[in-house]
Amino acid sequence: MKIVWLMIFPLWVFSQSYGLKELIVSAHTSNPMSEASILKTKAKSKQIEAAQSAFWPTLDIGASYSRVNPNALISPGEVARGYAAFKMELYDGGRKNALKRSKIFEYEASLFEQKAFFKSLTLDIISRYYTIQKLKAMLYALNGQSQELQAQLERIKKFTAAGLSTQEEIDKLQAVYEENRYRVESTKLMLETQEENLGLISGLPIKNLKTSFLNEPKRITFEVFENSKILQAGADVLEENAKAIDAGYKPQLALQDTYSRSHYDDLKNAGFNAEDLLLEGQNEVMLTVNMRLFDRGKMKKEREALLYQKMALEEERSHRIREQEMNFKLSGSNLETIRVKLESALSALKAAKSTYKSVVKKYEVGLVDNIAYLDALNEQTLAQARYKETQYDYEIAKSVYYYYAGKDPKEFVQ
């Protein structure tokens, strides 16, 4: 049974581990903020439907009851009335059309916002994922250094007991060992923090992560950010709202048909039947037309205010595009820089390993002191961590490059 469990356990652990793409997909589908973004878009869709319904005629029904005391000779003391009113706007100067187009642009902006949110969420997940990998690499190096320091402490203690070393050397090694232990615990805390945050965003357990990489950038073309498209959609919304205000200066034509039924009570005896003078049922058809002639420029100024806001958004959009182009160029240069850094880090790691092997042999036979040994050990530890860190920094840099190219980094995860 034990052998079977040992065979099954690695498969079970692997099944509970997740790669970068799985984390991103889970975050896009289960993260409450993702759901909130989707619901906002649905709300904008319903506003378009509401604006479309404004073109249809309206039908209202109502009722009223009144009691007057005292009442006039031919005026009933009690009146109960019910009515149905049909109304249709025949012409409004294009106001409803403008408002509908405004809602369509708002909906488009919400789609861009949703897409931009998902892209930024992907970028955040990639950054946290590789930060976790960097911290794990650092933790591995620090733990290796702790084991090496512990072994050397045990060796020096034996030498001291035999009179071949001093307490001062033990104290120095112990201090370095304790400092390294603190760094281990500090790194563990940072690692736990990143894992908890990534778990919160993705909705998945983060203890076991599969190795994931991004494709190498090749022939990547530039696309404008969704944020710039949002600004353009916002400018279009303001323009349509300005047209809706401008429609207020045009004639407004409406048709209304109201049918009412009334019941009267508490009629005074005036020597004749007062009910003959009162109508029980009545149908009223009314065609109205009105036009704003003077408002001291109120609507005109409101329209101009919206147009100035539109112009401001267009200027901001132009700046955002130039800013994105700049960051796209810089992120490409950053990739080249990290590639060079990666080669340098690999060379430094090879040199540090070679130096450490040489120094540790000399240290064990007493040819170098513990300071030289500790320097060599620390340099090897840092070189290992730097190389892994540079590898993961390169993956993060690739995601940033794709992001500023206007792409979704998720599409380039292997």
Image (cartoon, helix red, strand yellow):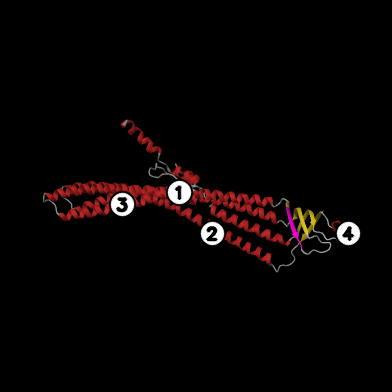
Earlier-in-chain disc, 2 versus 4? 4
Earlier-in-chain disc, 4 versus 3? 3
For the residues labelled 3 and 2, the Cα–Cα distance comes to 45 Å
Residue 384 sits inside the magenta stretch: no
Q: Quadrant of residue 286?
A: bottom right
Q: Contact (CB < 8 A) between labels 1 and 2? A: no
Does residue 311 sit above or below 146 in this rendering? below
Task: State which mark lies toward you, 2 or 4.
Answer: 4
Q: Nearer the viewer, residue 322 or 266?
A: 266
Q: Start and end of the magenta stretch?
A: 61-68
**Residue designated by label 4:** 272
Tag 2: amino acid: His
**Residue designated by label 3:** 185
For the residues labelled 4 and 1, the Cα–Cα distance comes to 84 Å
Task: State which mark lies toward you, 4 or 3.
Answer: 4
Question: Can residue 294 be spotted in the picture?
Answer: yes
Earlier-in-chain disc, 3 versus 1? 3
For the residues labelled 3 and 1, the Cα–Cα distance comes to 24 Å
**Residue designated by label 1:** 201
Instruction: Judge left or right: residue 230 versus residue 293.
Output: left
Does residue 298 sit above or below 164 in this rendering? below
Tag 1: amino acid: Ile
> Percent position (x, y) of residue 333?
43, 53
**Residue designated by label 2:** 319
